[in-house]
Amino acid sequence: MSNNEDRQQKDRRRFIRHPLAYPIKTFVEGKENIQVLSESENIGEGGILFKSEKRIEKGTKVKVEVDVEGRKIKTEGVVVRCEEDKDGRYNIAVSFFSPQETLKVRMMEQIVRIELFKERLERRYKVKLDFSCVAKEWIRRYSKAFAKRYR
């Protein structure tokens, strides 16, 4: 196993994966008009896993646009795994390779947590709430604890 593969194996165990299903668009770098529409299987600080009808070779640089609760978050990474499943589709794992990309994933996770908080409050109080108002309350209550996870 190469050093890079060893690091990827360790990263696979180190980062928490969130089983989040969001629409994504993947743009293959250097190839005009190659765009893969899919849905995320899981997202973590280290990367994203999604299924695809198209094979994307390991080592390929990609740009990924994730639609999280109506907000588009664009990240960049490299395909670290592409395995065909029993249905003939491909499980594609993309690793993020910069602190800026990791920060975007943290923001994505925070948006998801705020949305879940909003849904919980709406169910409890049987009202519709504005996302920005709920976000301010979530930040007031939980942002310090959330930030500690990434130190």
Image: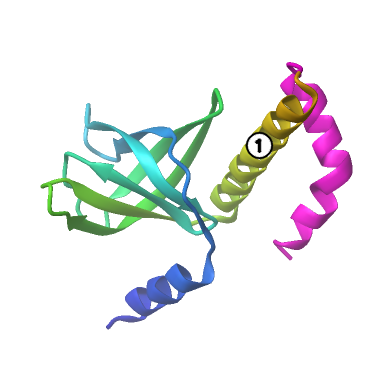
Vertical side of 69 occupied by 41: above or below: below
Q: Which residues are magenta?
A: 127-151
Q: Position of residue 12 (x, y in %)?
A: 43, 68
Question: Is 33 displayed left or right of 149 in the figure?
Answer: left
Front residue of this view, candidates 128 and 111: 128
Image side of residue 24 versus residue 36, left or right: right
Magenta span includes 138 = yes
Residue 47 position by quadrant: bottom left
The residue under label 1 is which amino acid type? Leu
| Residue 25: percent from left, percent from top | 35, 32
Question: Secondary structure under badge 1?
Answer: helix
Residue at the image position 25 percent from the left and 52 percent from the top: 91
Up-down relation of residue 80 to residue 134 (above or below): below
Percent across and percent down for residue 16 are: 54, 62
Q: Is residue 140 magenta?
A: yes
Q: Quadrant of residue 9?
A: bottom left
50 or 61: nearer the eye? 50
Q: Residue at x 39, y 42 (%)?
A: 40
What residue occupies the far right of the structure in this picture?
140
Mark 1 crowd level (few <14, some 14–19, many ≥20, 10 Å Cα): few
Nearer the observer, 86 or 10: 86
| Whether residue 94 can be seen here | yes
Instruction: Using the rendered view, name the quadrant where residue 126 is placed.
Output: top right
The residue under the point 22% across, 26% down is 33
**Do we see residue 58 in this rendering?**
no
Residue at 66%, 32% (x, y): give it. 115
Left or right: where 91 falls relative to 137:
left
Question: How many labels, in total?
Answer: 1
Q: Main secondary structure of the magenta part?
A: helix
**In the image, residue 144 lies at what x, y percent?**
84, 53
**Which residue is labeled 1 in the image?**
116
